[in-house]
Image (cartoon, rainbow, N blue to C red):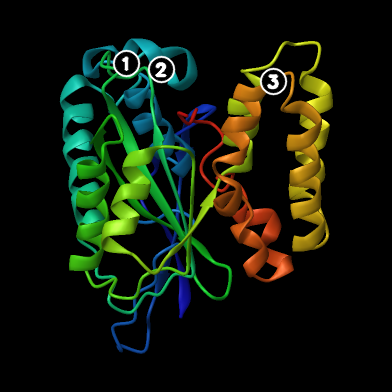
Amino acid sequence: MVRNGYLPQRPIQTGLGDIEVKVPKVRDRSGSGIKFNSSLVPPYLKRTQNIEEFLPWLYLRGISTGDFSETLKHLLGPEAPGLSAATISRLKQDWEQDYQDWTRRDLSKKRYVYVWADGIYSNVRQDDRLCLLVIIGSDESGRKELLALTDGYRESAASWEDVITDLIQRGLKIAPKLAIGDGALGFWKAVAKIWPDTDQQRCWVHKTANVLEKLPKAVQPKVKEALHNIWQAETREDAYQAFDHCIERFEPKYPKAMECLAKDKSSLLAFYDYPAENWQHIRTTNPLSPSLQPSD
């Protein structure tokens, strides 16, 4: 194997603009037909990975296909070559196909111990009835994976049933041990119907927000501290004691807030049935993307 000059120079789009690149060639003198391609600069690479990831992000933020060149000219140069409206339309078709392939992937060899679910609303579509239904699963090794991401109608039970049923049809036959979510009744109705043996854990972040919004601002810090004492307790017994103490302390003056807390007592403390090293992860829906705002 010997060095044999360079391939023709070609531009590659980067965050610093176009960079001209010459890739060395290698020749096989043995006649075995061995070929080498650069892993840094593959044969058909036109733009770097950060640009490839940036384009769909811009599209989701509402940039139209015809405005990409104008939007990116300050980043990639005045012409923004290779990013015409036709190119963006073709890339959009590729993104849609990638999504369709992802939604059809086989799950028959998968098993998830925990799943987190939430309905996430965004301002991409001016329709407050539609949201993204998101499910993330964690296997026995602790590896998390996005399982579902699809449109839903106001987090209805029917929409969640469709999502869970689709997972089962693609091979996810074993129900998770624990499901974590907010107070959306649609999701819990779907879980009770399709995964009746799955334990339910209410998200402490959402529950804390729901309780505090029913209180005067002056008393919110005290109640928040009392709520933290519950889910940060070392044992189930300590948590139940802190829970009862919080109810007794604040119920006389703030019955609505304490009613909101008390009605979900068992599902708020379900995480104590699982290994202590997992508590930090399974008592909230924090594994879902923090960049998107979840609904209550």
Alpha carbon of mark 3 to alpha carbon of mark 2: how far? Answer: 54 Å
Q: Nearer the viewer, residue 23 or 156?
A: 156
Please state the horizontal and vertical placement of residue 215, each as a whole percent of the image. 68, 16
The percent coordinates of residue 149 (x first, y second) are 32, 45
- Label drawn at residue 69: 1
| Residue at screen point 76% across, 20% down | 220
Q: Which residue is mark 2?
A: 72
Image vertical order of residue 45 relative to residue 282, above or below? above
Q: Quadrant of residue 151?
A: top left
Q: Residues within 10 Å of mark 3 (few under 14, many from 20)?
A: some
Q: For residue 264, which quarter of the picture?
A: top right
Question: Three-letter amino acid code at disc 1?
Answer: Ser
Q: Residue furthest front?
A: 252
Instruction: Report the front residue among 27 and 107.
Output: 107
Q: Which mark is residue 254?
A: 3
Label 2: which secondary element: helix
Q: Nearer the viewer, mark 3 or mark 2?
A: 3
Going by the image, does 140 lie left or right of 81?
right
Q: Going 77% across and 30% down the picture, which residue do you hit?
A: 224
Q: Residue at x 47, y 29 (%)?
A: 296
Say what secondary structure mark 3 lies in: loop
Label 3 vs 2, first from the N-terminus: 2
Cα–Cα span, label 3 and label 1: 56 Å
Q: Position of residue 105 (x, y in %)?
A: 24, 64
Tag nearer the camera, 3 or 1 = 3
Q: Nearer the viewer, residue 54 or 242?
A: 242
Dots 2 and 1: beta carbons under 8 Å? yes
| Residue 25 visible in image | yes
